Amino acid sequence: MNDEPDDITREIFIAATPDTVFGFLIDPALIMKWIGISHQLEPRPGGIFRVEISAGNIARGIYTQVIRPHRVAFTWGWETHAADLMALADLPPGASLVEIDLIPKGDGTVLRFRHSLLPKASSKLHDARWSIYLDRLKTAASGRAPAERPDATNMSPET
């Protein structure tokens, strides 16, 4: 059995400047538009990153890099999680790393996303959820209203 950690990578184009997109990564009022229901953020190296993704599911880590308007990186893990999401128990706060790079391209921004050091048990769930949330970020940062939030009561990887 392969116990090597998994990585999730994505690259998306957002019709907004890197500075605009950067705001959606560090400002609680803007982050609220694409991920989470409550936020405690100190966007500086060593500052807290704490987001209640859905009721009872709280991701926590610390910022490792905040370089406006080019890069945000923070550790990630689960402070609390719903009992039916035991796969998240394998990922305590700060155990994995999220890195987001913003590259100007024409009238917009290429966002390169990487979530590394994920345990196999939770990588499928994280992969499915990041696809949803990054699409919501793309929509919100482009100035449009994202679709309704994912159902907080059903966070299975298949939805």
Image (cartoon, grey):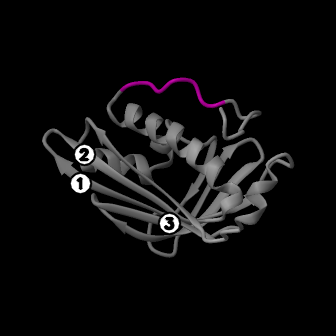
Instruction: Give the alpha-carbon distance from disc 1 to disc 2, as whole Å.
Output: 5 Å
Cβ–Cβ under 8 Å for marks 1 and 2? yes
**The furthest residue to the front:** 1
The amino acid type of the residue labelled 1 equals Ile
Residue 80 rendering spot, x and y as whole percentages: 77, 56
Residue drawn where x is 27% and y is 58% of the image: 69
Residue drawn where x is 77% and y is 33% of the image: 153
* Helix, strand or loop status at disc 3: strand
Residue 111 rendering spot, x and y as whole percentages: 33, 50
The amino acid type of the residue labelled 2 equals Thr
- Depth check, front residue: 35 or 132: 132
Q: Which circle's residue, 1 or 3, is located before the other in the chain?
A: 3
**Looking at the image, residue 88 lies above or below residue 2:** above
Magenta region:
144-150
The picture quadrant where one finds residue 79 is: bottom right
Residue drawn where x is 71% and y is 35% of the image: 152
Instruction: Give the alpha-carbon distance from disc 2 to disc 3, as whole Å.
Output: 20 Å
Q: Which of the labelled discs sits on residue 3, or is there none? A: none
* Helix, strand or loop status at disc 2: strand
> Mark 1 highlights which residue?
103
Q: Is residue 80 in view?
A: no
Q: Is residue 116 in view?
A: yes
Residue 83 rendering spot, x and y as whole percentages: 86, 49
Q: Residues within 10 Å of mark 3 (few under 14, many from 20)?
A: many
Q: Which circle's residue, 2 or 3, is located before the other in the chain?
A: 3
The amino acid type of the residue labelled 3 equals Phe
> Mark 3 highlights which residue?
74
**Looking at the image, residue 150 lies above or below residue 124:** above
**The furthest residue to the left:** 106
> Mark 2 highlights which residue?
109
